[in-house]
Image (cartoon, rainbow, N blue to C red):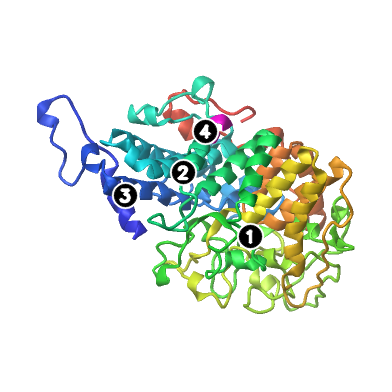
Amino acid sequence: MKNIYILLIGLLTFSVGCSETFTDVDPIGSLNDAQLANAQGIDLLLTGAYSVLDGVRNNGIGNGWGRSADNWVMDVASDDAHKGSTDGDQPDLYSLELYNWQTANGYFLARWGVLFAGVNRANSVINLIASSEDPSAYTVQNAQARFLRAHYNFELIKHYTNVPDITPELAAALEYSVPNSGETLLTYDKIAADFTYAMQNLPASRGAGYDGMGRPVSSTAQAFLGKVHLYKGEWAQASTNLEAVISSGQYALHPQLVSNFRSETENGSEAVFAIQYSADDGQVRQGNATGALNYPAAFGWCCGFYQPTQDLVDAYQTQGGLPMLDTFQASSAMDHDYGINSDEAFTLPTATVDPRLDYTVGRRGVDYNGYGIHEGKGWIRANFSDISGPYLPKKNIFQADDANNFAQGGWGQNLSGINYHIMRYADVLLMAAEAAVESGNLERGRALVNQVRQRAKDMAPVAGTNPDIDTYNAPWTDQATARKAVRFERRLELAMEGHRYFDLVRWGNMPAHMAAYIANESATITTFAKGQVFEAKHTYFPIPLQAIDQSNGTLTQNAGH
C-alpha cells in the first residue's frame, strides 16, 4: 500500500497556477492544491513524507548506498564498523572509512538528497494544511509533519552541521537556494521548536483513529526534544524531557535484547520511533533496501559489507562483571581468527565478556542467529589483505526462525523486514543517565545505567560463550568516572545501530580518540594500517560539491573541506 501512495504522491505534489488564462487549466492526471486540501489529499502527502524515512525515493542522487537510512555508513566512519567486503568494492565507502574525503563522493550527496527530500515533503504537507479551509481540523496531521521535518533536519545538522533551513515559507515560494549561514542557517533551536509543537499537538497514545506503530505520539516527540537539548549540552532541559518520557510509563525494556530485532516483538514496549520495514510476503517492496549489502558471504547472501571492528569486540571484555573502561585496548585476550582459514585450528577466546557482544557481533565458534556455528573465514567475503577483519554484524540480520523478516530482491539481495529503531527506550534511559551525570546527579545516572545492565545480566546469553556481567553496585562519587561509564554503556548497548559516530562528535576530542582506535585496530588487523588520519574536519560531512554547484555558490563549504 505504501508504494501505491508513493506513486500517487509523485503525481500530486506539485500544483500549477499561472496568471495567463490559457494556462489556468491543470494538466490531465494532476491535481492542484485546492483539490488536495482535504483529509484524503493531506493524508496522501503525509504518507509521502513518512515514506522517505527508509531512504528510498524516485530520482535519487549520488551513490544510492549512501542513503543509509539506518546510518550504517556512519558506523563505518566511527570505531564500530569497517566497510566490509573487498577493498575495491564500493570505492566511495573505502575512501570514507580511510578519511580520504572528497566533496564529490557520492555517499555524501546521496544522504543529503534523501534528507532534503524528507524536509521538502514535510513542508508540502504543512503548506497544504495552511491552504485548507480549516487548518485547525488537521492539527494532528500538522504535528506529524512538523515532527518529520524536525527529524530530517536533525539528521541533516548531525551529518553536515552547516545546513540551510528550508522553511515552509521558502518552499511555498520555491526558494530553495538560500545560504547555509546567517538567518537561513538551520539551528538546533529551530529543530527544537518543531519537536515542541509536535509534543504539544500529537495524541498521547495510539488508538481512537490514530493507529500505526510508525506514527509518533506526544512522548515520542518529547524524547527527541530531550535529545536535541542533549546535543546542545543543555543538561537540565534534556533531563526534564527525558525523565518525563521515563515517567510516562509508556515504555519498558524487553527482557531480551534480541526482541528489538524480531518481527513479533520489534514494535513492543521498547520501541520509541522506528522505520517500519516489512518483508512484505516476499514481494520485498518494503524491506531495508539501503542496507541490502550488509549480509554474510554465506547461505547465498550478499554482499559481506558492514563488519564490526576488533576495537568494538575488545570493548565487550569484562573484569569482575564490569567494563574495562581504561584498559580494554591494551588487552589482546579477544584477538580472534584474523588470518586463519576455516579449515585451520582455532580456539575461541576464553576472556569473560558482556553477553551483548554475541547479540551484536558474529564471531567464529559462536552461533550466528540460529544459522549454526559461525565457521570463520568461509563466511567472510573480505580477504586477509583487505581492511575489514573477521567479524559479521548481527542486529541487522534476521533470526533463522523469523521467516517474517526474510525476503530477497531481483538480483538476490536481502531486503530485511527488521525495523530500524531510530530511537528505542534503552537509548532514552542512557541519554537521561548522561544528562543526570552532567548535571551532577551521579546516583541517578548510575540507577539508569543499571536498568540497562540489569537487562543484559538477566537475558539468556548466546550458547557457548563466556558471559560475565554485573551492575555498578558501588556509589558513583566521581563525575569524570561516571561520565566515562555512561558513555561506554552507550557503546555496549547501541553498537551497530548508527549512533556511535554522532556520540563521539558531540563528546569532543574525536581526533585523539580515533587515533587510539586506528592504532588498536591496526595492531590486530595489520592491513587496516593505511596511514589514515582522522582530522577535526572529519567530525562532519562536507557539503556535497554538486549541491554547491547547483546553488551557484550560495552554499558555502564546511571548514577544512
Mark 4 falls on what kind of element? helix
> Mark 3 or 4 closer to N-term?
3
How many numbered dots are placed on residues in this image? 4
Spatial separation of the CA atoms under disc 4 and disc 1: 27 Å
Quarter where residue 19 is shown: top left
Count neighbours of disc 2 (C-alpha within 10 A) and say few if under 14, some if 14 to 19, many if 20 or more: many
The stretch of residues the image draws in magenta is 188-192
Residue 58 position, x and y percent, is 36, 49
Instruction: Please give the label number shown on residue 148.
Output: 2
Would you name the residue on which mark 3 appears? 44
Q: Quadrant of the C terminus?
A: top right
- Residue 106 % position (x, y): 51, 43
Question: Tag 1: residue type?
Answer: Ala
Find residue 430 and report its horizontal and vertical position in percent: 70, 50
User: Looking at the image, is mark 3 or mark 2 earlier in the sequence?
Assistant: 3
Is disc 1 in contact with disc 2, using a CB cutoff of under 8 Å?
A: no
Amino acid type assigned to the residue bearing label 2 in the image: Leu
Q: Mark 4 belongs to which amino acid? A: Ala
| Location of mark 4 (residue) | 193
Q: Secondary structure at mark 3?
A: helix
Q: CA distance from mark 3 to mark 2?
A: 15 Å
Tell me: residue 295, above or below residue 203.
below
Q: Is residue 71 left or right of residue 362?
A: left
Residue at x-position 80% and y-position 78%: 345
Q: Earlier along the polypeptide chain: callout 1 or callout 3?
A: 3
Precedes in sequence: disc 4 or disc 1: 4
Q: Nearer the viewer, residue 438 or 111?
A: 438
